Image (cartoon, rainbow, N blue to C red):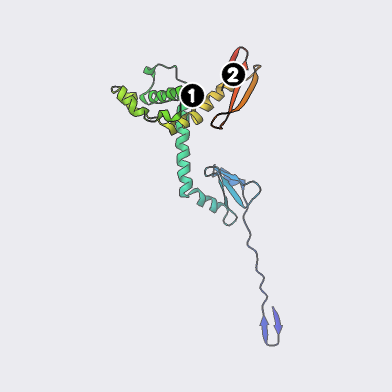
Amino acid sequence: MQHQGSSVYFSVVKMGKRKTTYNSIWETDFKWLRSNSGDPSKAFCTVCSKSFRIDGGGKSQVEIHGQGTFHLKLLKSQRSQRTFVKSTQENAMIMSEPSSSLTLEEQVIRAETIQALTCVDSNLSFASADGDGDRFKAMFPDSKIAEKYSQNETKMKYVIQFGLSPYFQDLLKSDLRGKPFSFKFDETTTSQTENNMMVMFNIGVIVLML
């Protein structure tokens, strides 16, 4: 404050607002939360695969993000996908089980798994799965499995990529563990200009081609 004659002048100093930085303790309450590399004013959501600011409200901004419509929709979808993948992998392990020991739901999933493996083994188009459900119902009208069977291009891709592939990769790792093996690969470009890679593991006298 300054006096100048009969006038009084005030000097106002504006204080900067303190910004909040990321706190790893929040991860205890929000399992999908991670730090944003290189920027402590942001957090990263593993569900939405995106960063968002937390420097204005800290944990409250994390809570707001977690209640967002898009986040909740993705979270629900991922939970159902994990359940489906677990079911597919479990059914891949009971392929040799007699049908009489399986529930109807397990028999249906096993049928869809067999069809997916057939598609891969015969190098068929995933689009060939479209219409399988209606076709099998017409072919086997008295079958409860055919009645429940549901397979299409999108579902088959998901079964193979997220259900069967991890399962067989684990089997391969188990076979390779503690054993000598050779690894070969070959890259080529198809007539459609798509890059393909063939991988081969040679384990003793057993040859596995992926």
Quickly name the residue at label 1: 123
The quarter of the displayed image where residue 146 is located:
top left
- C-alpha distance separating marks 1 and 2: 25 Å
Q: Amino acid at mark 1?
A: Asn
Residue at the image position 58 percent from the left and 57 percent from the top:
56
Q: Residue at x 41, y 31 (%)?
A: 152
Query: Which of disc 2 and disc 1 is earlier in sequence?
Result: 1
The x and y percentages for residue 170 are 56, 24
> Which amino acid lies under the numbered mark 2 shown in the image of this protein?
Asp
Near-viewer residue (143 or 56):
143
Secondary structure of the residue carrying numbered label 2: helix
Question: What is the x, y in percent for residue 173?
Answer: 59, 22
Task: Tell me what residue is drawn at x 52 percent, y 27 percent.
Answer: 165
The answer to whether marks 1 and 2 mark residues whose Cβ atoms lie closer than 8 Å is no
The N terminus - image quarter: bottom right
Q: Which mark is residue 175?
A: 2
* Depth check, front residue: 167 or 25: 167
Q: Residue furthest top?
A: 205
Q: Residues within 10 Å of mark 2 (few under 14, many from 20)?
A: few
Which of the labelled discs sits on residue 104, or is there none?
none
